[in-house]
Image: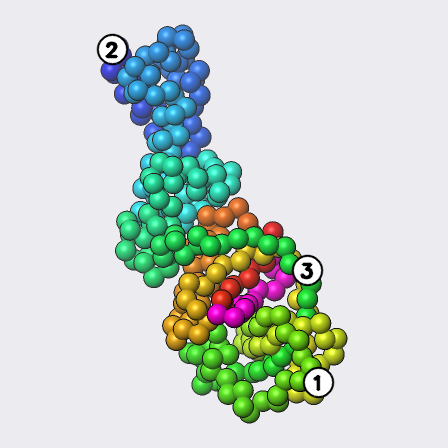
Amino acid sequence: MQYVDLMKKCEDYIEEHLEYPPTAKELADLTGYSLYHFCHIFRAHFGISVGEYISRRKLEKAAENIEDGMSITEASQRAGYDTPSGFAKAFKKAYGTSATVYKKKRNPKFADYYREEEIFMNTCFVKKEAFSALGYCIKPEKEDILIKENGAYWKNIDFKKLPKYPMDLEDCGEVAAWIHPDEKSGDLNYFFGFETEAETAPEGFALINIPEAEYAVFEVQVPATDEKLSDELKKLWKDIFDGWFDLSDKKFDEEKMCFEYYLGEKAYIYVPVK
C-alpha cells in the first residue's frame, strides 16, 4: 500500500475515533511501520505531528458541532477538554475569536442569546466580605410582570410613597436584589437599599445580610443614569447565565446571593462563583 493510501487510512481511523483518539504508536501499528518511520511519514504528509493533527481536528469538529447548535460545554467535552477555560483558550487561538462569538456569527438563531465578547472585557473576580444592606423590600404587583423581567427594577418605584431614609444613614453603595422566592410560584420580592453598618432596621425598612463570597463582577456598559440601563442589565444577566458560564471554569455558588450594585454612575452585577 502506498504512503498516500496509508495516510488516508490513518485519517479515516482518527476521524472514526476522534472522541477517544488513537496514539501515534497505535497508528504506527495500524500501518505496519515502526513508530520512528511512521512519525516521519505522517509529518511529511500532513505537515504536523499526530498530536497536533488530532488537536486541530478535534477543534474543527467542535466548531462544526457548535455551528449545528450543540452547547459549547458539550462540544468542549466531546473535544476532550477537561475544563471550559482550556477549551476557550484553544478555540480562540485556533479561530481568533471566542466560541460564543463564533456560535453567534455561524448560527444566527443564537443571536438573541450571545453578544460580542467585548461585553465581558471588564469582568473581574473579587472576594467580598459579608455585609448588610438597609432598604425597602417590595412585592411587585402582578401587572409589573413585564417590568420585572428587566434589571434596575428600582427605576419603576415611586420612592415618594415610601418612608424616608434615616438622616444619619451612611451609605457606601446601592444594592438591588430579587429575594425570598415563593415556593409555589417562584415569584420574588425586590430589595433596594444601601450597603450599611446598621444593625437594625427602622420601621418600614428591611435589613438583609449578604454572606462573604467570591464574585464574578460584570460592569454594565452604560451609566446608571442612562434610560437604556434596564435593557442593558437584562441582556447582561442573560448573557452571564447563557454564555459566560459555558466558557468559564467557575460554577454558580447557589448558597450565596447575586445582586446589582450601584456606585455613582457605575453599575455592576455581582454573581457568586466557586
Occupied quadrant, residue 15: top left
* Left or right: 207, with 74 as reference point: right
Q: Which residue is mark 3?
A: 129
Q: Nearer the viewer, residue 188 or 89?
A: 89
Occupied quadrant, residue 171: bottom right
User: Who's the residue at 34% across and 40% down the image?
Assistant: 96
Res. 25 in view: yes
Instruction: Give neighbour class at mark 3: few <14, some 14-19, many 20+ (Cα, 10 Å).
Output: few
Q: Nearer the viewer, residue 269 or 194?
A: 194
* Left or right: 99, with 192 as reference point: left
In the drawing, what numbered circle is on residue 202? 1
| Start-end of magenta stretch | 253-265
Q: Which residue is mark 2?
A: 2
**Gap between marks 3 and 1 measured at Cα:** 24 Å
User: Who's the residue at 61% across and 81% down the image?
Assistant: 136
Amino acid type for the residue under numbered disc 1 = Pro
Residue 118 in the image, given as x and y percentages of width and height: 39, 53
Amino acid type for the residue under numbered disc 3 = Glu
